[in-house]
Image (cartoon, rainbow, N blue to C red):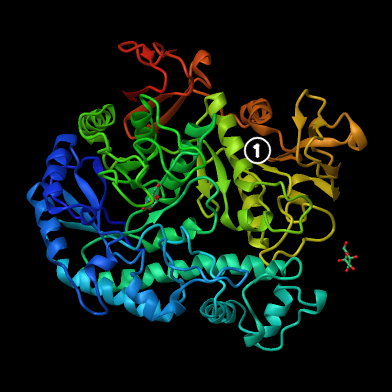
Amino acid sequence: MSTPRWLRRAGTPRLEFGADYNPDQWPRAVWDDDVRHMREAGVTIVSLAIFSWARLEPADGVFDFAWLDDAMDLLHANGILVDLATATASPPPWLTAAHPEILPVDRVGETIWPGGRQHWRPTSPVFRTYALRLVRAIADRYRDHPALTAWHVNNELGCHNVYDYSDDAATAFRSWLRDRYQTIEALNDAWATAFWSQRYTAWDEILPPRLAATYPNPGQQLDFKRFSSDALKDYLIAEREVLREITPEVPITTNFMVMGETSAMNYADWAAEVDFISNDHYRTPGARSADELSFSANLTGNIAGGRPWFLLEHSTSAVNWQPINLAKRPGEIERDSLLHVAHGADAVCFFQWRQSKGGAEKYHSAMLPHAGADSDLFRSVVALGSRLGELAPLAGTPRTPARAAIVFDWESWWAAELDSHPTDRLRYRQEAFDWYTAFLDLGIRADVVPLAADLSGYELVIAPILHVVPAALTARLTGYVEAGGHLVTTYFSGIVDENDHVWLGGYPGALRDLLGIRIEEFAPLLDDERAELDNGLTGSLWTDRLEVTAAEVEVLASYKTGDLDGRAAVTRRPVGAGSASYVSTRLGPEGLGVLLAELAARAGVTSDLPAELRGRVEVARRGDFRFVFNRTGEPVDISALSPAEPILTARGVAVLHA
Ligand code: GLA
Ligand code: GLA
C-alpha cells in the first residue's frame, strides 16, 4: 500500500465541505451566482467535470478545455479546491456510435445501450484506449493548476456496469482464471467440474456465467464475482498510473459505495489502490435508516484503516432513484453529516451543488435547490457549513477503536448468497447489520471491520455468516480465541473453503473443533415458521440439527418446539481465557440484543453509558471528541454526559470533549 496522502492544500487542517459541481449544465452567468453562494455556505471543495466527457472531447481526439479552464480559474479565485474528475464515467455518443463494441452485455446477451451512463465494459481495450487518452489530456492540461487538489477517478466504478458478460469480459475472465489456477486441471478441481459433465479441456471453452438452463457452476459464479471486482480495480489502477506519471504529488481517490446491499465491489481489497478512501452514502428508508448510515460509515472508516476519509456524496434531502423519495426531516442533514464525521470522515460533500433543471436527476436534492437560496434547505446547508467550520480541530484525528468488532467479509457475502443453497432468503449484510443494531441498542460501541483487519485488539469479535473459511482462517481465529479473544459466529459459517467446497465430516467443518459442535443437517425455516428457544427468544430463517461434541461447551439456549425440541440453539465453548460461541438461528436485532448482553458481559465488554441512555443515543469517539446522537424521535435528557446542554433534540447531535 502506498503511503496514504490527503488533499494537496495549504493552511491549517479543517473539515472539507462541498459537492459535485456541474457548471457545464448551466450558462456561464449562473457560475458567478454559484461561487457567491458557495462562499456563503462555506464550501471549500468541489468535485468537477465528473460527467463532462462529451463536452471536453466533442469529437474523436478534439479537446475543448476552454470552459473547464474558466471554471477552474473561477473556483481558484474564490478559494475553492477542486477534486478534478477524469471525466471517464459516461462515454459520449460519438464514441459509442463509432465503437459499439465497448457497450456492456447482460447475462441474457442483451446489449446495454447508451442513453443512461456508465455504458462501458470494464475490460474493453477500445474503451480503455479512449478513456486513458482523455485522462492523459486532462492531467497534462491541469497538472500545474493551483486549484487541483486531488484526482477523482471515473465515478462510482461499478454502479451500473460491474457485471458484463460480453466477449471482452470472456477473454479477460479466462486470463484472470489462468493467473489464478495456472492449469486447466486446477480450475477443473476448483470448480468441481466432474459434476454435470462440465470438465474443461481448454481455456477458450470457458465463459462468464451467462444465462444457463439451470444454476451455473457455483465456482464459476464466485470466481466471476471476484473477477468482476478485480476488473474494475484494474481499470482504477490503469487511470491511476496515468495520473501518477503526470502528477505524482497529487493524491487520487475514487468514490466507493459502501452502503445498503451494494456488494459487487470488494472495497476492502480496493482500499490499498487509492491515496485516500472516499465513500458515497445514500440512506435506505426505514426505521433503522440512521443505524445503517452509522454501519456504513463505521465500515468505511475501518476500510480506511482508521485514518480519515472523505464523504464524497450524500444528499441534502430526497434522492430520485428510490421507489418513493423521502425528503429529509429537520435536523437530519446535520445528524447524517456528523454521523459520518464521527466515524472518521474529514469531508462532508453532497451530490450535487445546484439542483439540475433537466435530466434524470432533476428531482434529486442538492445544496442549492430549485427553490433557490431563499429556502430552508439552503439555510440548513449554510448552518451545516458553519458547524463544520467549528469542528475544524477534529480534522486529521483518527477514529477511536472500540473494544468489540463485527467482521465483514465480501467473500462470505458473495458465497453465502449464491443460488442453489438451503434457503434463498439468507442476507449476509442484514445479519451483520442486525448485530450492529444490537450493539447500539446496548450502548456498546463496536467497529465494523474487514476480515483482514487485526483482530487482536478486540475483546469480542462477532463474525456473522462467516461462510468461506480457508484453512489459514481457521488457524487465525483459533489463535485469536486461544489468546483470550471471545469469538461469536452464526449459522452457515465455516462451511466452505475458498473454492466453495464443503468441509466434510459435519458442519461447520472449518470451525467445528473450535466451537465444539457438529451439525449433521441444516434446517432452514419457511417464511412463516418460527423456532422458539427456551430463553424466550424466537428464531427465524434458519436452524441447525446441532449436537455438542466437546464436554466443556455450555448450551446458552435450546430449541423448545418442533423437531429440534431439546437441541442446542446457542452454544459457548470456553477456550483458555477466551471463548467460541455459535448462534444457529436468526434472532433479529431485538433477540440479538438480549443474547449479546450476555455474551458481551461474559467477554467483559460493557456499555460505558448511564443505563438510562443505552440504546437511546449512539456515542462515537474520535480523538478527544465524543459525538452523541439521538436515536429516538423525541428529545433525550443527556445531562449525565453534558450538564451544560442537557437536552438532545430529536435527531440532534452533541459534540463533547471526551
Ligand atoms: C451517485 C452518483 C451521482 C448521482 C447520485 C444520485 O452517487 O455518483 O452522480 O447520480 O448517485 O444519488
Ligand atoms: C432432477 C435431476 C437430478 C437432480 C435432481 C435434484 O431429478 O434429474 O439430476 O438435479 O433433480 O433434485
Say which residue label 1 marks.
Answer: 577
| Residue 19, percent from left and from top | 27, 46
Is residue 638 something one can see in this rendering?
yes
Determine whether 611 is above or below 393 in the image.
above
| Residue 60, percent from left and from top | 27, 79
Crowd class of label 1 (few under 14; some 14 to 19; many from 20; radius 10 Å):
few
Pick whichever, 196 or 647, lies toward us: 196
At a point 46% along the width and 15% down the height, the residue shown is 634
Q: Is residue 52 left or right of residue 328?
A: left
Determine whether 112 is above or below 372 in the image.
below
Q: How many marks?
A: 1
Q: Quadrant of the N terminus?
A: bottom left
Pick whichever, 626 or 144, lies toward us: 144
Q: Quadrant of the C terminus?
A: top left
Residue found at the far front of this picture: 358
Q: Quadrant of residue 237?
A: bottom left
At a point 27% along the width and 56% down the height, the residue shown is 5
| Residue 415, percent from left and from top | 66, 58
Pick whichever, 359 or 243, lies toward us: 359
At a point 60% along the width and 58% down the height, the residue shown is 411
Amino acid type assigned to the residue bearing label 1 in the image: Ala
Q: Under tag 1, what secondary structure?
A: loop
| Residue 505, percent from left and from top | 85, 58
Determine whether 302 is above or below 252 in the image.
above
Determine whether 487 is above or below 47 in the image.
above
Is residue 245 something one can see in this rendering?
no
